[in-house]
Image (tube, helix red, strand yellow):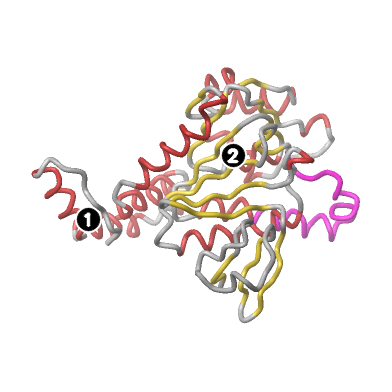
Amino acid sequence: MVEHFHTAQGVDVSGRFAAQKPPGVYYALLGNDMTKLTDKIIVNKSNGVGWIILNQPDKKNAISFEMWEAIPHITEQFSEDDDVRVVILRGQGGQAFSSGADISQFEEKRSSKSTTDRYNMTVKAAVAALDQLAKPLIAMIQGYCLGGGASVAIHCDIRIAADNAVFAIPAARLGLAYRWEDIYPLVQLIGPSFTRELLYTGSRFNAKEAIQMGLVNRVVPVAELESYVTEYAASIAANAPLTIHSANRTVAEALKDPEQRDLAEIETLVAQCFDSDDYREGRQAFSEKRKPGFKGH
């Protein structure tokens, strides 16, 4: 169980351990021990929004093994934090969301079957954690979004891109293959024809082409990206948390094969919404012509 973490600014969001660890490093309390995970992810939260920032700008935010390892711990923390209602995932600096997996580690991390298996299982756990995050997850995409970086974006709920964004999945130019859990959600998102085009060609596509494919939800001028996404997230955070959670889980179930869907869970979530204080607050606010103040219960 992850209980507490430090942001890159050295602030522990639980209010504890702030003076015990240096800034710029992501720590998690695993059991009774503070464990350093990586200094290459910045974690922060404010005004109901959690931030996950890929922090390797000198490599265009290439995702290292340690970053893949840290992602499930971060998403677990945000899932359990009632103060966080929506999460934004972005890259540090202005050049890239992420240029993909950190290929400089492949000789060490993917040079044998055993190391490759461990690496692949770690990546699989990371993207599964993104899928299972119990809060809306927005990818804020600026610059390069390539390979494993594109996979991370695909596993977010919503993708908002700057008009300078560039997308590619260059596996065919590297001689590697993508796993089922990477290709299947891409097919669900943009269909088989565009998926084949991305994978067969390995070509780069601009933001205009990406929105035509359905790869992103919105494209905005690069100068407006951060303010637009922040306001977009705030609008979600202002809505009823139980309703958002119900929608989140219902869409997730809809994407599963029919025999794997837990429709009973969906019925339970719907019933919780109708029996909540927030539903009563929503009705009262509507009748009083004011904004509702939702509490998540």
Q: Viewed as shown, does residue 82 lie left or right of 137? A: left
Whether 234 is among the magenta residues is no
- Where residue 157 sits in the image (x, y, percent)? 48, 42
Residue under the image location 32 percent in, 46 percent down: 238
Give the foreground label among 2 and 1. Answer: 1
Viewer-nearest residue: 1 or 85: 85
- Badge 2: few (under 14), some or many (20 or more) residues near its Cα, within 10 Å? many
Residues at circles 2 and 1 in contact by the CB criterion of under 8 Å: no
Say which of 30 and 147 sits in front. 30
Image quadrant where one finds the N terminus: bottom right
The answer for how far apart the CA atoms under marks 2 and 1 are is 31 Å
Amino acid under disc 1: Asp
Q: Which of marks 2 and 1 is nearer the N terminus?
A: 2
At mark 1, the secondary structure is helix
* Residue under the point 77% across and 34% down: 171
Q: Is residue 214 visible?
A: yes
Q: Which of 259 and 58 is in front in this view?
A: 58
User: Quadrant location of residue 19?
Assistant: bottom right
Label 1 sits on residue: 278
The image shows residue 191 at horizontal and vertical percentages of 54, 28
Location of residue 199 by image quarter: top right
Give the extent of the magenta segment: 100-125
Which residue, given by chain and number where applicable, does mark 2 sit on? 153
Q: Quadrant of residue 2?
A: bottom right
Q: Which residue extends farthest left?
A: 287
Q: Where is residue 71 in the image (x, y as percent from the top left)?
A: 63, 56
Which residue sits at x=66%, y=21%?
Answer: 205
Residue displayed at 79% across by 40% down: 59
Q: Return the residue found at the far bottom.
A: 32
Q: Position of residue 42 (x, y in %)?
A: 63, 53
Q: Which amino acid does label 2 sit on?
A: Ala
- Vertical arrangement, residue 103 with respect to residue 263, above or below: above
